Every structure is written in structure tokens, then in C-alpha cells.
Image (spheres, helix red, strand yellow):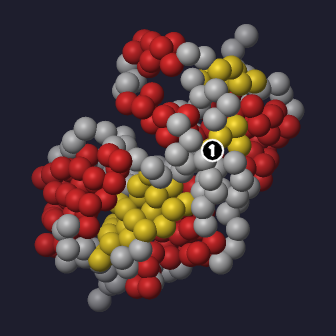
Amino acid sequence: MTEQPILVLGGTGKTGRKVARQLAARGLAVRIGSRSATPAFDWQSPATWPAALDGVRAVYVSYQPDLGFPGARETIGAFAETAVASGARRLVLLSGRGEEGAQASERALQDSGADWTVLRAGWFNQNFSEGFFLDAIRAGELALPTGDAVEAFVDTGDIAEVAVAALTDDRHIGETYELSGPRLLGFHEVTAELSRATGRDIRYLPIPEESFRAFLADNQLPPEFADLLALITDGRNAQVVDGVRRVLGRAPRDFADFARDAAASGVWAATGH
């Protein structure tokens, strides 16, 4: 008999691919959940869910674009019920710190009767190297409506390691862990760290919120991205939390270490003129 696999949704994404890699390194069977996988998994096509869940014992639940966006609560609730009915009762949900909309999705998953763990993560270090801010960093200017607000950016490697612990150790059932990095950084400090790591001049330009919303509209990006920045600007997450240490028994990775390694990979090679 082959071991029942663990389904990793978003298994090619920022956290999911690291979860999958770490599970495989432990010798555990992994099934990737994505539109390009076999069987395919698509959040917007519930007909794909049963095949992806067939024979699965646990699921890492990473939802795109964001748990707080319209329709997420209903989708997460329906998926969790399908998972439990299929026998995959162990669900580990990646959520966001301080997001009321995301908490509604958390409750929908919990109400399914699953053996759940919730990971509430802050903004990722990797948003600067493989996400929304990448092009701006390559161009040398990060323009955001975030003023002097601070955030305890968290590394996706730490999130993945916590997720693997939660997927494989029953002591984490019923727990909600808040995950952050080890220190608070404003965007001036972030770009200073990135400048040091790359040897380039990368600067932060505070802009009005209306300008940022216009940028989103011009680039056909969801307006909710501007609302997500409120999680930084209103200070609700302006504190370091201890979830990484509680689960892993060590300090979370520092932003400077992330920046050094990402710069060495060449991901921030300059673009433009």
C-alpha cells in the first residue's frame, strides 16, 4: 500500500512549494494542488476538488487571491466540507494577521468539523522577491501609500516549516498561530536593507492612496490590494508575535538574511533605462 498523500494547495506558490519540498524531504507523499497538476485543482471549479482530494489524509489550504476577498468565505467553507466528507479531516489554513474577512473564512473552515490549524501570517519577505513588489524593486523605486508605517515581515520558509509541523503533529490541532518576523521595519528601512544587499540604490517613495488605486486600475489589478495595505498603515499588526518560536522553538528569520540570499540569486537585477 502507498501512503496517503498530503495535498498542498497552491503547491507551486510562495509558501506551498516550500511546504511540498519540506514534506517530501521527510519522505512523505505529496500531491500538488494547482490548475496545472494531475489531477488538476481549481478553486473556481468545485468539480475538480473530489479528484484532488481522493485518498488524501491532510491538506495545506492556501487560497488565491486572498481569504478576505469577496466569495472566499463561501469557497473555503464548501471546500472544507468536501475535504472532511472525503476523509481528509486534517486541514491547515494559511490566513492573514488582522484580516476580518480572512477570519470569516477561518470560521467557515472550522465549522466544517475538520481537525484544523490556522496560521495567521503577516506580509511575506518574498513579496519583494517573487511577488507584488518585485518589478518595483528591480526598477529601484517602491512607491506605496504606506507612509511611515511598520510591519514585521515574515519569511515564507518559516511559514512552511510551521505548516509542516501542523500537518504532521496532532499537538497543533485546534491552534491558531500568529506568525511574524523578528523585528518591525518601515519601508524606508526595507529599501535600505535591499540597497545594502544588492549594492544598488533602491528608494521608497510614499504616495497618496488615490495614486496607488489609480495604478491598480491602470494595470487591471484588484482594488482590494489597496485595502490589504491598510493592514500595514493602520498599525493593527505593528508588533512582533511569537508563533514561529512557539512551534519551532527558534527565532524567525530576519529580513536582512532574506535580502542577502535573494540578492545572491540575482532576482533583483536592475531593469529599465
Residue 41's x, y, as percent?
Answer: 26, 53
Quadrant where the C terminus sits is top right
Residue 4's x, y, as percent?
Answer: 31, 80
Report whether 98 appears left or right of 135. Answer: left
Q: Quadrant of residue 223?
A: top left
Name the residue located 42 percent from the left edge and 31 percent from the top edge. 227
Q: Quadrant of residue 136?
A: top right
Name the residue located 29 percent from the left edge and 89 percent from the top edge. 1
Badge 1: few (under 14), some or many (20 or more) residues near its Cα, within 10 Å?
Answer: many
The front one of 181 and 209 is: 209
Report whether 140 appears left or right of 84. Answer: right
9 lies above or below 44: below
Q: Quadrant of residue 28?
A: bottom left
Q: Which residue is mark 1?
A: 151
164 lies above or below 44: below
Q: Could you say whether the residue bearing mark 1 is in a helix, strand or loop?
A: strand
